[in-house]
Image (cartoon, helix red, strand yellow):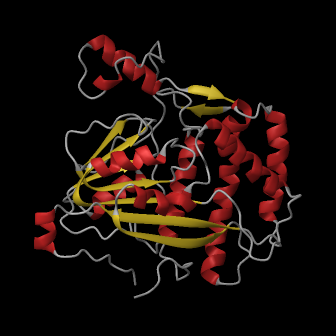
Amino acid sequence: MADRSKIDGQPAPATQEPLGTPGALEPDENPYDNSDADSAFGSDGESSTQSLASSILNYEYENGRRYHAYCAGAYPLPNDEKEQERMDMQHHIYLLLLRGEIHRAPIPRPVGNVLDIGTGTGIWAMDFADLYPECNVIATDLSAIQPSWIPPNVQFRIDDAEQEWDFSHKFDYIHARSMGGSIGNWDRFLKQAYDNLNPGGWIEITDFETWATTDDQSLPETSAYHEYQVQLNLAAEKFGKVMNISPRFEEFVKKAGFTLVTEEKRKTPLSPWAKDKRMKALGQYMNIQMMESIEPYSLALFTRVLQWDNAKIQTLLAGVREDLRNLNYHMYSVVHTVYGQKPLAPEESDKAGKSIPRQLG
């Protein structure tokens, strides 16, 4: 059996074009009235429905970027069209890393109820629903930025994963990706995931490290990029939601009670400096992604938490972009994918026998 915890590196699949995104809807008045949030999907009255719709659709604007108004301030990244394009590019990079696969947990077929937390543009949820037409996918996010033309087995909901989960049924698979800096209490988050899974169900969480690594110490500590990542992680910690959290995923999943926990790590160059053809191509995509990421990740945190003005931020970002273009800086991030199974009930375990994770390739 191959050791999947080691750094991966095999030929990439064909590319996938990102999906389009809908335009913004006109907001109603009173965007911050969330008092009737529990009635989001089946309201008690017209006025509460209008108040909730207003909080969902009336966006906030800072430093030229658009942010969600529902649970305003809970998530530091924007949700405008530029950010949606970045999210879809990131989805493509994940596909390259997984050689075309969209999940790693060994989910048995037929697939039942699936939950995608922090769905963003919904591209992963729609791809999964197309791949498993027998399943039913609920995909949640703070922003209503998902398309209206969707597979019949997908339902998008506006919801805050840090509040109490309130679903009418349990799930067979829960997926969360790129949630670093979005969750304040990972123990509570994974306990809710555990409680909302059927026995034998699977959890899978994936994210990049938000800290550039070099094997040859080629990135100077005096560089703009090093200063950027130091300040970003400092701001996120002060905000109460650690950004560079993925190295602890395995610890969190085991602590929550999951079994057969598997961690996979994959190196991702931040620019096309690698000699290996696949890693060089991956680095080209990642470099585009990074150029688009550094501003949305820093704007809200640096202005709200560090009290920087936009001019100071843009000066630092200019230096960061120069560092990302410097192929003498052999920077890479590591993507952590962790999946685990909720134990079967004793009687089910006796029937099914021991579950064995699959291996890829």
Work out whether residue 141 or residue 260 is closer to the camera in this orientation and state it: 260
Q: Residue furthest bottom?
A: 1
Image location of residue 8, percent across then percent down:
54, 79
Image location of residue 275, percent across then percent down:
71, 83
Query: Which residue is at 28% across, 23% downward?
Result: 39
Occupied quadrant, residue 160: top left
Query: Which residue is at 79% across, 56% downward?
Result: 225
Q: Residue furthest right?
A: 222
Report the quarter where the N terminus lies. Answer: bottom left
- Residue 210 appears left or right of 353: right
107 w.r.t. 158: above or below: below
Query: Which residue is at 42% across, 44% downward?
Result: 188
Report the quarter where the C terminus lies. Answer: bottom left
Occupied quadrant, residue 253: bottom left
Image location of residue 208, percent across then percent down:
58, 60
- Residue 262 appears left or right of 220: left
274 w.r.t. 316: above or below: below
Query: Which residue is at 45% across, 39% downward?
Result: 145
Image location of residue 198, percent across then percent down:
21, 54
Residue 206 in view here: no
Residue 64 in view here: yes
159 w.r.t. 122: above or below: above
